[in-house]
Amino acid sequence: MRRIVLFSGGSACRAINIALCGKAHLTRVVPAWDSGGSSKVIREKLGLLAVGDLRQALMTMAHGEGRAGDVVKICNARLSSNLGKDDALSEFLYYSEGRHPLLERMEPGLRGAILNYLKTFVAAVGSDFDFRGGSIGNLILAGACLAHNGDINTAVFVFRKLCSVVGDVWTSSLDSDLVLSATLKNGKRIERQDAITKLDELDARVGIAEVRLSTESGAPPQANPATLEALASADLIAFGPGSFYTSLLPHLQIREIAESLSQVECPRVWIGNILQCRETTDRTLGDLLDVVSNQWHREDPSRRPLLTHVLANRVFFPFEKTVGNFPYLSHAMNEGDQCTVTTGEYEDAWNRGQHDGEAVARALIELVP
């Protein structure tokens, strides 16, 4: 079976992930520097790497493989955010004590493993932890990581077994203290992934000049060996869709990943976003690919180009057209681009601004040698 590696965030490539299941052995590579939502609270309390994108990708993989059973339903559950702190704890205990009907009807060994990981989590954080808005799947995955001496790869392996997932999901790095920062074109510095994603309109108009992925200790980020292994055996490597500066570009700043990408012989494809976002206000796809190329060659100017192919969504309007708050991303390419650009109708007809997963999956499969 074809082996495809997809660099992405947690949710933007959901339809593509689902469409590729059954057509290829898929490996998702997700960020480990998420600093918002439930992941933020867990990171700050326990010092673990971000688990939110991992959990989302695993749940998407399970759905695509037709394995969205009771375990996946539990892992997709989220605790109420509008309750008091004590009420949120009571809601959590409804899960961790096995009183939820979905847990009660599970096979004993499976239920026992889930409850053990939830109890491991609460033992580590204490009963004063703020559970409001927490993802049960994030808490299970964090508990599994704690139970396996902080080894997130082992935790993911066990989590996949719980959900009967065949595809792989790995973080690009195993470092638990990754921090993403951005410098705007006016020199202003924005710290943390969640703040970059939520740029205000004025900062978005100024635009991001560069992002930097680092560790709190100052040491260079280290690659996940499981990700390097997947790259070495890939028949195709794809990037996107997703948040350009916070979910895609930082992967290339991990030295061992960049070195591995420079050595593989398979097609390397950039899947262009459908819409602009706060991070890419007033940019074209060609502008963004220039950013990729500049970063790629900054460390080693002699490197061959990263990308061999680009999938660009056809924009039908000769004027600016928006979906919600954001315009379509023009696919205007700049002179000197060395990759093959395929322009197609990759937008979902029923969900404007989102990708048609089947259309993109067909295009990717056609590029596999």
Image (cartoon, rainbow, N blue to C red):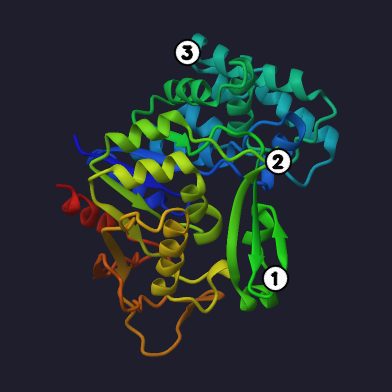
Residue pictured at 18% horizontal, 48% vertical: 368
Based on the displayed image, in which of its 4 quarters is residue 274 positioned?
bottom left
Q: Tell me the kind of residue under disc 2.
A: Glu
Mark 1 or mark 3, which has the lower sequence index? 3
In screen coordinates, is 34 left or right of 263? Answer: right
Residue pictured at 54% horizontal, 60% vertical: 245
Query: Tag 1, which secondary structure?
Result: loop
In screen coordinates, is 283 left or right of 139? Answer: left
Q: Tell me the kind of residue under disc 1.
A: Gly
In screen coordinates, is 182 left or right of 319? Answer: right
Q: Which residue is mark 2?
A: 216
Q: Tell me the kind of residue under disc 3.
A: Glu
Query: Tag 3, which secondary structure?
Result: loop
Residue pictured at 62% horizontal, 78% vertical: 205
Rendered-image quadrant of the N terminus: top left
Q: Which residue is mark 3?
A: 107
> Does residue 9 appear anywhere in the picture?
no
Residue pictured at 58% horizontal, 32% vertical: 137
> Does residue 344 appear anywhere in the picture?
yes
Q: Which residue is mark 1?
A: 187
